[in-house]
Image: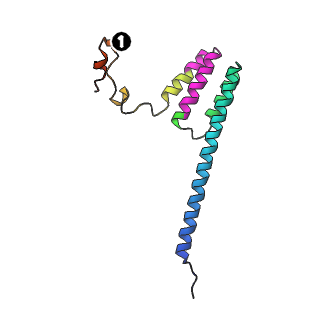
Amino acid sequence: MRGLVSSHTLRVVIAHAICACVTLAAVASAKAQDAAITLAIRQATAASLAKKYDLAIEIYSGALRIDDLSPSERRDLLRRRALENESANKQVESEADWKAAIAVEPVGGPWSCAAGGGVRGSHRATGRSGRDLLQIH
């Protein structure tokens, strides 16, 4: 009498188990990264409230070194560090962070002017009414 489970079935079960372990490891890693970013933001905010802007900048710089930040996370951390640089009267560094935040992809979407969509002009610059601003090109 042969074994109850064929070798093919056993290989399939092992492959699924490995995939499950890899998936769980990735989820755990993502949660750890989210926790690290959240902790950094809390610590930097506390430092900023204590007017320790250089410490807040250092904390945000450390968070920006985290691998695999999403574009949204990278933009947010750069924006926060830019604000801290402004508070510390470091205008050159602040401007560099603002420019870096703006440059993080994806910048637009179907409604952005760069993507060919969006609202035409500005009513302040063109003198057009709000109704004209709703025209999509």
Location of residue 67 (image quadrant): top right
Location of residue 53 (image quadrant): top right
Is 79 colored magenta in this rendering?
yes
Of residues 102 and 38, which is closer to you in this image? 38
Residue found 33% across the figure and 14% down from its top: 123
Q: Position of residue 25 (x, y in %)?
A: 61, 52
Of residues 136 and 82, which is closer to you in this image? 136
Q: Position of residue 99 (x, y in %)?
A: 51, 23
- Badge 1 marks a residue whose secondary structure is helix
Assess disc 1: are there few (<14), some (14-19) or many (≥20) residues with their C-alpha within 10 Å of its C-alpha.
few
Where, quadrant-wise, is the C terminus in this rendering?
A: top left
Tell me which segment is drawn in magenta. Answer: 73-95
Residue found 62% across the figure and 41% down from its top: 33
Asked if residue 3 lies left or right of residue 103, the reply is right
Asked if 74 appears above or below 9 in the picture, the reply is above
Asked if 41 appears above or below 33 in the picture, the reply is above
Residue found 33% across the figure and 18% down from its top: 121
**What secondary structure is the magenta-colored segment mainly?**
helix
Is 72 colored magenta in this rendering?
no
Residue found 59% across the figure and 25% down from its top: 80
Residue under pointer 1: 124
The residue furthest bottom is: 1
Q: Position of residue 51 (x, y in %)?
A: 70, 18
